[in-house]
Image: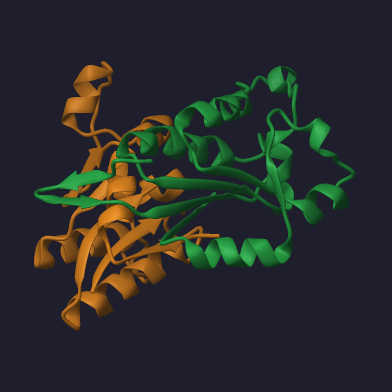
Amino acid sequence: MVSGYRKGREVVVKRLLYVNRRPPHGTIYGHEGLEVLFTGAVFDQLVTVLFLDDGVYQLVRDQDPSALGLKNYAKGFRALEELGVEAICVAKDDLATRGLVPEDLALPAALVSREEITALMESHDVILSF
Amino acid sequence: MVFGLVVNEGPYQHQASDTAYQFARAALTTGHEILRVFFYHDGVYNGTRLTVAPQDDRAVTERWSALSEEYSLDLVLCVAAAHRRGILDEAERRRNSKDAENLAPGFRISGIGQLVEAAILADRLVVFGD
């Protein structure tokens, strides 16, 4: 259970949904999105992380962008489990469309359907999309 | 209603900053509150005072500064994103031994925590960008 963020005498707990929907490395969105996740952890909220569309590529294991002169920020996703997030979800259809299977991913994730994604977006207070 | 705004794209390149400005102005003039406008990714480019607006076009940065002055609107650039893109206030200039600062009036530079805090405390977080 999370203890929330204290504002004066009030303790605020919200459900935050982080949505990663872009591929890694080509733009900085995934990298800077992960930085928000890390910093956001200190606020002790109910956090779900969802990977969809080309965002599923961010979770692919053993990435090595060193030939591009880039830092492999994506290995930071492996720390998600230690950040105390409630759930790590991957869009089942988007994974399959790209010829990927759960074993290709760097960490265990819940495979979710389109209907479940809709439900996730409805059940969270805030959606942060990167 | 209390809004938190996020601007994820730079000026002129993308409509995001214009739309966020129009949204902010409309909200403030109709009695709503804006907790903070957080500039992330290339959005930090909205906060350099070295921008020279074309004479026959809107002045995106000056417009934000004026709105901040009029309504005490909190305009925050993410420090990590600003470092990467060369936006510095006097403190960051000194800390990083650079020869100039370029922060526009009404803006301040702070951490990503300001984004997450706005997400938690605002009634609605509205994100501008792709």
* Image quadrant where residue B57 sits: bottom left
- x, y (%) of residue A30? 58, 40
Residue at 47% across, 66% down: B15
Residue at 41% across, 62% down: A125
- x, y (%) of residue B49? 26, 47
Looking at the picture, tell me which residue is in the foreground, A98 or A41: A41
Q: Colour of chain A?
A: green
Residue at 66% across, 62% down: A116
Q: Is residue A89 left or right of residue B9?
A: right
Looking at the picture, tell me which residue is in the foreground, B85 or A72: A72
The answer to whether residue B71 is above or below residue A33 is: below
- x, y (%) of residue A36? 43, 39
- x, y (%) of residue A81? 54, 30
Most extreme residue toward the front is A1
Q: Considering the image in quadrants, where does the C terminus of chain B appear?
A: bottom right
Q: Considering the image in quadrants, where does the N terminus of chain B appear?
A: bottom left
Question: According to the image, what is the colour scheme of the structure?
Answer: by chain
The answer to whether residue A16 is above or below residue A57 is: below
Q: Colour of chain B?
A: orange
Residue at 68% across, 39% down: A109
Q: Is residue B35 left or right of residue B85?
A: left
